Image (spheres, helix red, strand yellow):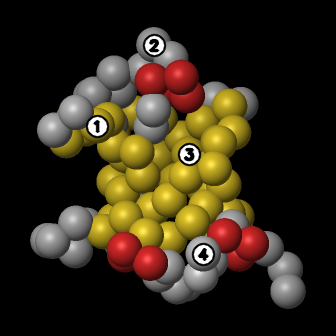
Amino acid sequence: MLEASYTFSSRLEKLASWTVAPLPDSIPIEAVSSFGRTPVIASVEGREWSTSLWTDKSGKTMIALPKKVRGYLMPGDTVEIIFRFDYDRFGR
């Protein structure tokens, strides 16, 4: 199976103590693992990390950017994120 990657631009938002990037509705979420999360490998500005996409109660899917990844980026900044599904972590 070919692993597709997805690239999107998003404006960072603050959500409680998290800084998140909402995904556009046009990106298909292939599967959902336990607790409503979808494991992915993501990168922003050349920094790659294992994380998960998650969908909130309103149906908006997002990805959290930890401080060690986002560096100087703050809510309100627009970033380009690349991710691919991490099939090795599905079902764990």
The residue mark sitting in front, 3 or 4, is: 4
Residue 25 occupies quadrant: bottom left
Earlier residue among tags 2 and 4: 2
- Report crowding for label 4: few under 14, some 14 to 19, many 20 or more residues within 10 A (C-alpha): few
**Residue 6: assigned label:** none
The three-letter code of the residue at mark 3 reads: Ile
Of residue 71 and residue 68, the one placed in the foreground of this image is 68
Q: For residue 10, which quarter of the picture?
A: top left
Residue 34 in the image: state x and y as whole percent: 44, 78
Dot 1 alpha-carbon crowd within 10 angstroms: few under 14, some 14 to 19, many 20 or more: some
Along the horizontal axis of the image, is 56 left or right of 90? left
Identity of the residue furthest to the top in this view: 72
For residue 60, side relative to residue 65 (left or right): left
- Which of pointers 3 and 2 lies earlier in the amino acid sequence? 2
Between marks 3 and 1, how big is the CA–CA gap? 17 Å
- Residue at 22% from the left image edge and 74% from the top image edge: 59
Q: Residue at x 35, y 27 (%)?
A: 77
Secondary element at image label 1: strand
Q: Which residue is mark 3?
A: 81
Q: Which residue is mark 2?
A: 72
Q: Amino acid at mark 1?
A: Trp
Q: Secondary structure at mark 2?
A: loop
Disc assigned to residue 18: 1
| Neighbour tally class for label 2: few under 14, some 14-19, many 20 plus, Cα within 10 Å | few
Q: CA distance from mark 3 to mark 4?
A: 25 Å
> Which mark lies nearer to you, 3 or 1?
1
**Contact, mark 3 vs mark 2 (Cβ under 8 Å):** no
Q: Amino acid at mark 2?
A: Tyr
- For marks 2 and 4, give the CA distance: 33 Å
As drawn, the label of residue 92 is: 4
Q: Mark 2, mark 4: which one is toward the viewer?
A: 4
Specify which label sits upstream in the sequence, 3 or 4. 3
